[in-house]
Amino acid sequence: MKIPVLKSRKRRYQLGAAASAVVMASSALMAGVPGAGVAAASAASKYNIVLIPGLTTDPFYITMYAGAKQEAAKLGVNLTWRGATTWSTSLQVPIVNSTLATHPSALLIAPTDTVALYKPMAAFAKAGIPVISVDTTITNQSILTAAISSDNFQGGQAAAQAIAAQAHYKGAVAVINTVKGVSTTDLRQQGFLAQMKKYPHMQVVATEYDNDSATTAESQARALILAHSNLVGIFGTNLFSAQGAGQGVVAAGMKGKVAVAGYDAEPAEIKLLKQGVINILVIQNPAQEGALAVQDAYWALTGHKAKIKKHVLLPNVIATTATADKPNVTKYFYKTQP
Ligand code: T6T
């Protein structure tokens, strides 16, 4: 399988500011990983940028934070990361609202819902604070300074192609998705379904939602295998869904019989990929997403708005069992600590 190499966006404006990294105080709002709520900062900086991830305990967002932190240090701006430890709109909304009360210079956010987060995010824009969506986004993007994401539709298509090829283009497949109304995973599912339509001897028999829980995804995978004797593949649309799908296939004794295509690249998934349980992982570049978001915020704050590309879609990297040890793949594996 061809492995696309991620291209880094051309740096159109380079700031010479040197960063002196200091540690900022943590806040009660910040939770999750050890060190969460601790920000890389420059004591001298007048810019306080806040990054609100989908959740703080997910290696995808931890890696994004690491990239954002590095860029913030380079540019000499303060960066704070705060968020809930689980994927939850009802937890994220009050965090966003209370962040506004701290009057940050810019907001970088992975909204947990395409509609529910519009109002809380729009309040920042109304107050003159640049808002950049990173990873996920909202449907009404009029209030955004920029939206940075991976090519999620293409990732879903790649997952479908891999399962179809593994199953010799016939049989039943299922999707295990996270939560409805999330821009990224909705698009991955759409890409998967669109691609599957091209294979006349394949049928999509089910779409499950696991609420971002690997444990739930595992039982859903086992139930799907029991319910559909002709099941040849499962697509887990994110890290937890893929992990659970792989574990479910192992538990059902169907390794090698039911193909698994997954998203992201944290240690449990990589282990399953190397074991041949997961056949393909669509890997993103969250560190680059985080860095670009900080850079865009900086440009917006320093009078260089013209340099901001409003919509950035980063390419994916495909890892298969055969390529799981290749350095041009392993360099994209996610971090578990920022
Ligand atoms: O797949 C990523 C992210 O892109 C998605 O929006 C939510 O799930 C992850 O964080 C992985 O768990």
Image: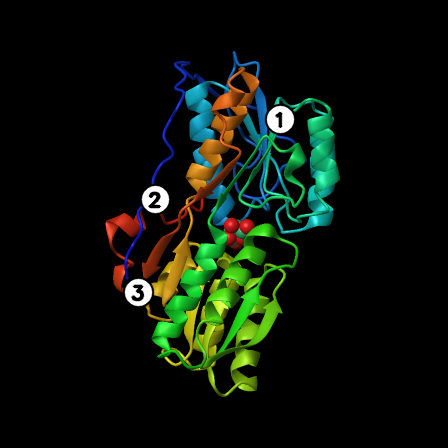
> Dot 3: within a 10 Å radius of its alpha carbon, few (fewer than 14), some, or many (20 or more) residues?
some
Residue 77's spot in the image, x, y percent?
Answer: 51, 20
Helix, strand or loop for disc 3: helix
Left or right relative to 4: residue 252: right
Above or below residue 286? Residue 215 is: below
Q: Earlier in the sequence, mark 1 or mark 2?
A: 2
Q: Earlier in the sequence, mark 2 or mark 3?
A: 2
- Residue at 39% x, 67% y is 161
- Residue at 24% x, 54% y is 326
Q: Amino acid at mark 1?
A: Pro
Left or right relative to 79: residue 275: left
Residue 243's spot in the image, x, y percent?
Answer: 47, 64
Q: CA distance from mark 2 to mark 3?
A: 19 Å
**Residue ID for mark 2:** 6
Q: CA distance from mark 1 to mark 2?
A: 27 Å
Give the quadrant of residue 338. Answer: top left
- Residue at 47% x, 71% y is 196
**Residue ID for mark 3:** 321
Residue 217's spot in the image, x, y percent?
Answer: 56, 68
**Residue ID for mark 1:** 130
